[in-house]
Image (cartoon, rainbow, N blue to C red):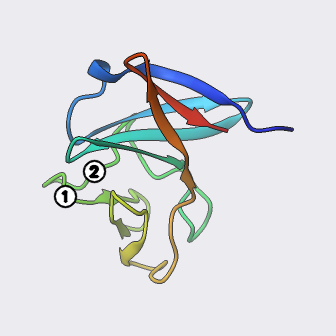
Amino acid sequence: MSLSWQTVCHIDALPERSAQTYPFQGVSYFVIKFDNHIYAYLNACPHRQIELEWQENDFFDLDKDYLQCATHGALFLPQTGECISGPCQQQSLKKVATRVKAEKIQINI
């Protein structure tokens, strides 16, 4: 399967420090806006390969400073996906390439 750019939403549809899940071909991805930058990751904790959120599109900790695995409490840096606390320290979320084209967020899957 070759990689391709998939449009996920208009840039204004993703508020600051929020996340949105997007499934493609049976795989779950999520896109976040953090400090006015767009990042995307495979929706799988490196610890057990389970989805991070326990409620739909709820990826951030209470202060909205870190991404958090709802199952084990692991914390990840939003900019890099690096785990800084929890059972998967020294590991990272799988980053997905992003771009904004014609005011639409796209991910490369």
At a point 71% along the width and 32% down the height, the residue shown is 4
Q: Nearer the viewer, residue 41 or 45?
A: 41
Relative image position of residue 22 (x, y in whole percent): 53, 30
Instruction: Give whichever of discs 1 and 2 has the lower sequence position.
Output: 2
Q: Amino acid at mark 1?
A: Asp
Q: Is residue 42 above or below residue 13?
A: below
Residue 66 location, x and y as percent? 26, 60
Q: Amino acid at mark 2?
A: Phe
Q: Residue at x 42, y 16 (%)?
A: 102
Foreground label between 1 and 2: 1
Alpha-carbon span between mark 1 and mark 2: 7 Å
Q: Residue at x 20, y 36 (%)?
A: 16
SS for callout 1: loop
Please identify the residue farthest to the left as the structure is shown.
63
Whether residue 102 is situated above or below residue 68 in the rendered picture:
above
Residue that mark 2 sits on: 60
Q: Residue at x 49, y 77 (%)?
A: 88
- Residues under numbered marks 1 and 2 in contact, where contact means CB atoms less than 8 Å apart: yes
